[in-house]
Image (cartoon, helix red, strand yellow):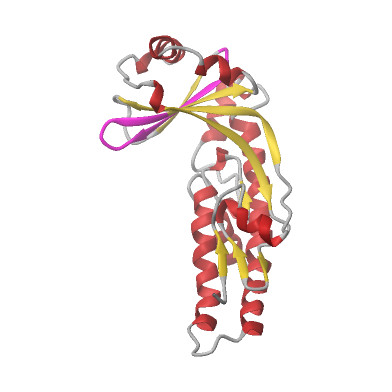
């Protein structure tokens, strides 16, 4: 094939086969994710629940389901994973009493190791990286999937005319891949940095101890990201529209 695209995750085999390094930074915390059934009030919302211990996020999902994210310092996640279904449910409902009607089992519990990483290059001759293979971000900004999808779409826009030719011009293909990297890598680097800063505001550094400041920082309209991006927006696209 004239072009191979690596979209195989943070530990990308394609990236390693290409010999492209990635500066991976592991955070000092994990998230324990629980997929649960039950109502949220209000529905169709993301809830940040603060107590003396820290932060628990409850994200509403369709059909009366939810995703619960529990912040854990490195090592503390093992204590939660060793608990029985009943003990873990008691722990969650003690910290978030309005979740008393939830239902889940051990099979619904997963650990997410939090990291950020940026590949040194997003392309090599005849190859490109997209998504987590190219960049991994802290989930604090809810922008990781936006970066991945928009990056893949932009790569397609740039290389499609070259690949559609009757005979693929490899020099033209490399030029398109260079253009992809020149646009997307700086944008991803800025997005990762803004997500890192937002992680400090809504997950780390004792942020739960000041609920009023926390509420301002978690506001979806706060515009804390690149070019004023907020939750769920694609900061790289905003950066491109601003002429960077």
Q: Nearer the viewer, residue 40 or 32?
A: 32
53 relative to 188, above or below? above
Q: How many marks?
A: 0
**142 or 10, nearer to the observer:** 10
Image point (65%, 23%), residue name:
74
Q: Nearer the viewer, residue 199 or 34?
A: 34
> Which residue is located at x 48 percent, y 47 percent?
232
Residue 65 shown in magenta: yes
The residue sitting at the bottom extreme is 166
- For image coordinates 57% across by 77% down, the residue present is 2
Magenta segment boundaries in residue numbering? 52-67
Name the residue at the left extreme: 63
Residue 39 in which image quadrant: top left
Q: Which quadrant, please, contains the C terminus?
A: bottom right
Instruction: Give the image location of residue 222, x and y in percent.
Output: 54, 42
Identify the residue at horizontal 55%, vertical 76% (top origin): 159
Query: Magenta-highlighted stretch: main secondary structure?
Result: strand
Report if residue 36 is visible in the image: yes
* Residue 209 inside the magenta-drawn segment: no
Q: x and y percent of residue 201 in the render?
A: 63, 32
The quadrant where residue 242 appears: bottom right
* Quadrant that contains the N terminus: bottom right
Q: Position of residue 189 (x, y in %)?
A: 68, 53
Where residue 209 sits: x, y (%)? Answer: 61, 18
Residue 188 as seen in the image, left or right of residue 87:
right
Is residue 244 in view?
no
């Amino acid at each position: 094939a004239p072009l191979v695209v690596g979209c195989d995750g943070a530990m990308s085999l394609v990236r390693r086969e290409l010999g492209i390094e990635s500066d991976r930074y592991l955070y000092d915390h994990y998230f324990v994710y629980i997929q649960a059934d039950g109502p949220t009030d209000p529905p169709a919302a993301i809830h940040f629940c603060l107590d003396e211990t820290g932060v628990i996020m409850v994200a509403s999902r369709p059909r009366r389901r939810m995703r619960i994210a529990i912040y854990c310092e490195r090592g503390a996640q093992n204590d939660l994973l060793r608990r029985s279904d009943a003990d873990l449910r008691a722990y969650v409902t003690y910290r978030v009493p309005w979740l008393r009607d939830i239902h889940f089992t051990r099979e619904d519990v997963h650990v997410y190791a939090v990291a950020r990483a940026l590949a040194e290059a997003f392309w090599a001759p005849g190859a490109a990286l997209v998504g987590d293979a190219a960049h991994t971000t802290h989930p604090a900004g809810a922008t990781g999937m936006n970066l991945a999808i928009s990056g893949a779409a932009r790569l397609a826009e740039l290389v499609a005319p070259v690949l559609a030719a009757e005979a693929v011009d490899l020099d033209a293909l490399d030029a398109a891949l260079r253009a992809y990297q020149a646009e997307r890598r700086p944008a991803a680097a800025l997005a990762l940095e803004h997500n890192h800063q937002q992680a400090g505001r809504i997950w780390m550094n004792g942020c739960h101890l000041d609920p009023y400041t926390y509420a301002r920082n978690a506001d979806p309209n706060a515009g804390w990201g690149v070019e004023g991006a907020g939750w769920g927006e694609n900061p790289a696209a905003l950066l491109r529209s601003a002429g960077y």
